[in-house]
Image (cartoon, helix red, strand yellow):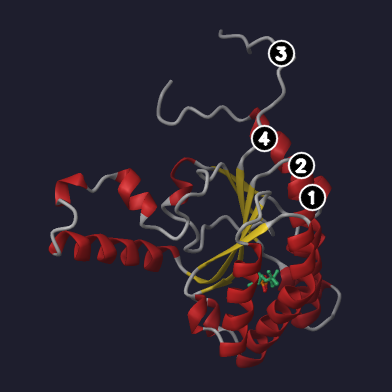
């Protein structure tokens, strides 16, 4: 029987890039007989708390699934509430992001949001563009399949224009055509609230990510829960297809 490798003094690896599917706001509210909005508000508090904790714990990139391209199917009032919370978040958080040297990136078709939000997002991206610390990526109106299709279209157009040979298109070129271009590979993907699905999030990027499904509802997730997730990541053996 193979024995476990002897423990070493070496520190467990810290994931460079962590993504979170923030699920369970509605159930958190329901358990307290509160409106769903109350759960989303606590969800925003968790975003503040966890993004700060991620920086303190040495994570370079944190990608958060805030609004999927399928979330438009929710009741109009809930969509409006979520957009309102996003507005509030951008207004309140921007100065801290600037002060803490955090760069904001947005993935997804955020230009389909209302004009004032698009302007706020563009402003926040621009004002943090030269920050060199951690990167906070917010996925807004994001769908991974649409992202992959858009990349394929872009490369097909480049091929048709004679700018790239079809046989030169490889995984690296394809990755560079995605909205996450230039970010470190995704190491750890967490989904809260006990659901075990990817829900059209970072499908390409998750190819070799460690997946972690935790029962905690997103509004209850905190720095300690993140530290625990990182510790679990540290105990996983990543083989990337090798032995
Ligand atoms: C899932 O909970 C959560 C969402 C669809 C939205 C996530 C959004 C936030 C945490 C707030 C906005 C984010 C930012 C960055 C300002 P759910 O409603 O699906 O919960 P349920 O499955 O329990 O109903």
Query: Which label was assigned to residue 14?
Result: 4
Q: Earlier in the sequence, mark 3 or mark 2?
A: 3
Please state the horizontal and vertical placement of residue 40, each as a whole percent of the image: 75, 75
Would you say 74 lies left or right of 241 here?
A: right
Rounded to the nearest angstrom, the CA distance separating label 4 from label 2 is 8 Å
Outermost residue on the front side: it is 130
Name the residue carrying label 1.
53
Mark 1 vs mark 3: which is more N-terminal?
3
**Mark 4 vs 2: CB contact within 8 A:** yes
User: Crowding at label 4, few (<14), some or many (≥20) Cα neighbours within 10 Å?
Assistant: some
Q: Is the residue marked by circle 2 packed among few (<14), some (14-19), or many (20+) residues within 10 Å?
A: some
- Contact (Cβ within 8 Å) of mark 3 with mark 2: no
Q: Give the vertical position of 61 relative to 31 (above or below).
A: above
Q: Are marks 2 and 1 in contact (CB under 8 Å)?
A: yes
In percent of width and height, residue 224 lies at 83, 46
Residue located beneath label 2 in the image:
57
């Amino acid at each position: 029987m193979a024995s476990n490798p002897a423990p070493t003094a070496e520190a467990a690896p810290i994931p460079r890039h962590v993504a979170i599917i923030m699920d369970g706001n509605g159930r958190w509210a329901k358990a307290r007989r509160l409106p769903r909005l109350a759960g989303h508000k606590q969800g925003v508090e968790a975003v503040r708390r966890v993004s700060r904790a991620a920086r303190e714990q040495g994570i370079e990139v944190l990608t958060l699934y805030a609004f999927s391209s399928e979330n438009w199917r929710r009741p109009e009032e809930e969509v409006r509430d979520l957009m309102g919370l996003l507005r509030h978040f951008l207004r309140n958080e921007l100065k801290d992001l600037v002060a803490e040297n955090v760069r904001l990136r947005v993935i997804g078709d955020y230009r389909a949001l209302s004009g004032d939000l698009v302007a706020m997002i563009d402003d926040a991206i621009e004002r943090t563009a030269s920050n060199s610390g951690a990167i906070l990526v917010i996925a807004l109106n994001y769908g991974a399949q649409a992202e992959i299709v858009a990349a394929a279209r872009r490369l097909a157009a480049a091929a048709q224009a004679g700018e790239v040979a079809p046989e030169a298109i490889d995984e690296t070129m394809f990755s560079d055509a995605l909205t996450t271009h230039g970010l470190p590979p995704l190491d750890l993907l967490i989904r809260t609230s006990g659901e075990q699905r990817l829900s059209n999030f970072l499908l390409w990027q998750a190819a070799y990510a460690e997946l972690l499904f935790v029962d905690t509802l997103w509004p209850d997730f905190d720095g300690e829960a993140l530290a625990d997730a990182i510790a679990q990541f540290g105990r996983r053996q990543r083989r990337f297809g090798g032995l």
